[in-house]
Amino acid sequence: MPRIRSTLDDLRHALRTLRRSPGAAAAALLTLAFGIGVGLPLMAAARAGISAQPALVPPAFARTAAGGWTESLITVEQMRDQGLNGALLVVLGAALLVLAGTCVNVSALALARASARRHETAMRAVLGADPRRLATAAAAELGVLVAGGGGAGVIVGLVVLGLLRATWPGSPAPWLAAAPDLVTLAVAVGLPAVVLLAGVLPVLRTSRGRLYDELAVGSRATPGRHEGWVRRTITIAQFAGSMMLLVGAGVLVRGSAPRPGDAGPGFDPRDTLTLRLEPPASLRGDPAGLAAFYAAAVARARQVPGVRAATFASPGAWLGLGPQDDVTSICPECSEGGLIVPVLHRATRHHAADAGYFAALGIPVLEGRLPRPGAREVVLNRAAASHLFPGAGAVGQTLMPDPAVSAAASLFPGWKSADGESASRYTVVGVVGDVQPAGFGSPAGAVPALYLPAGLFPPTSAAVAVRTAGDPSTRAATIEAALLSAAPGARVGEVATMEEALALHRAPLGWFAGVLAALAAFAVLLSSSGVYAVVAFGVARRTREIGVRMALGARPGQVVRHVVAGGLRVARTGAILGTLGALGVARTLQVFFRGVNPADVTVYAAVAGLLAVVAVLASWLPARRAARVDPNIALQSG
């Protein structure tokens, strides 16, 4: 019972103390609430997305006549999941940066407050207070801040998580629907709480130290040498942490933003309708029947009035999405190859495309020609031509997209394995432009792609593209009816214009860029407010010193310039240390996000300039107020 009464007394005393200094209490509460409220939902979403396993969906078509793929196969779903994981790792890193900034801010506020109250703590110790009792009282005060700020942070975090779910483009993301788990809560709330509660340590040190020195400092109401050193150290750490946080956020945002020189999708998406065509169930497993069905469906779509061209391909072809697997190229004159056999085994994305695919979409034929119907001929994009046939022309060369190709199969065209299977050879007859729309699973740069004839490799479901004269959406119903008339039991879905499909494909990247931009803006607010609070608190503590200087004849302008110069010196030291740390942060982010430039001078200069402005304002405003106070009143403060 006495212990409960003592705890209640500590809590009442903590509330009275916090009410007497509402500015410091509000700064700590807001820092905790918004720091946790931003970091918690992003950490929860990132952890849920990274730990989720994608559904294993087989490729949309069989690669060879035998229907095999190698163990190196990467499906479209896996590619998209890899792209999503990369973006989520970036978000997780940004959330940890925000939490780190929150910890720096609350620790700076707690240490600055403990340093300023050294005289009060020493006085209570001289009057007989037990050091453990003083530590308990300080812990109660900090515990109230942790409870209030942490609880508010969880509420803000749930609101932010709801906003993230509401703004996600397309169908709901399962990883956004997941609630924060216990590990995320422990890190997001516990880490700042532990850092803030570490403010008890200075109280213990003061109550067990040389009390005479502390009382002497307090009698002058002027910060002593130790407090001045602590304040400068805190401010330097604050600037360094803010520099790291803002540079990390800045390079992330600039790395995710589109660049003026980025290439377009590689084709003309205007006036084109896209549809997903599902064949009748009776044709599944019948390659010849599937090929005939798609050919008939596309032929009927071409007969619709106003249709200029119609074609089909495996799903995702015009998004640059397709299964990726090894391909064997044979090129005696290439600049690279094996020591004995001029053979290269390299990964390439596979698409099955109709003969009219390239003309319908406006993809340019750069070399050679297009495959003839029924012939074992393929085309490559420009990236694949240089990838598979380095230092030589690709047209006329031989490819073998088989599950396993040995040296014997490469050397001898008529080679057969023990079970009688022979390696299928295809001739490269053309090189076309790169298709490279940005999106998850589709890197911003061109990737090697191989286009197999859809007549030999019909997909289990096809993506149909119909180019019209004018707005394609006005003819959507007629085009759907024409496709469905090719065979009973066929189905059509995912109807959209090509521009809408591309926008939907790019939308998640835009969403992540928006999240990072919002994080950067929050980082600016968090760091600026934290730096301002600590610097302004330190200047305010020097009110008596300023009064002494003015009593000795210093003019207000001289005093203000002296204080501002001191603030800039501390800021300069913190910025130098922060730049070194920011380089390490940016290098780490570069590992997970290919667009990050760790040596982006623009970001470093902008962050340094922003923090310099904050340092000037945080020093100038309190110094100007103190310089306007009557020296007699200033000398009596404390």
Image: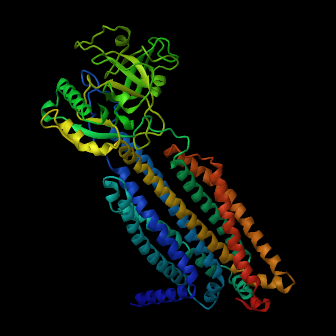
Q: Residue 501's x, y, as percent?
A: 35, 44
Q: How is the image coloured?
A: rainbow
Q: In the figure, is residue 297 to the left or right of 594?
A: left
| Residue projecting furthest to the right | 553
Q: Residue 487's x, y, as percent?
A: 14, 33
Q: Residue 359's x, y, as percent?
A: 37, 28
Q: Is residue 56 above or below residue 347?
A: below
Please name whichever residue, 184 or 219, is drawn nearer the observer in this view of the structure: 184
Q: In the figure, is residue 232 to the left or right of 335?
A: right
Q: Is residue 102 above or below residue 213?
A: above
* One can see residue 544 in this view: yes
Residue at position x 73%, y 85% in the image: 216
Q: Is residue 182 above or below residue 218?
A: above
Residue at position x 27%, y 17% in the image: 374
Image quadrant where one finds the C terminus: bottom right
Residue at position x 41%, y 31% in the image: 362
Please name whichever residue, 213 or 290, is drawn nearer the observer in this view of the structure: 290
Q: How many marks?
A: 0
Q: Quadrant of residue 215?
A: bottom right
Q: Residue 404's x, y, as percent?
A: 32, 20
Image quadrant where one finds the N terminus: bottom left
* One can see residue 222 in this view: no
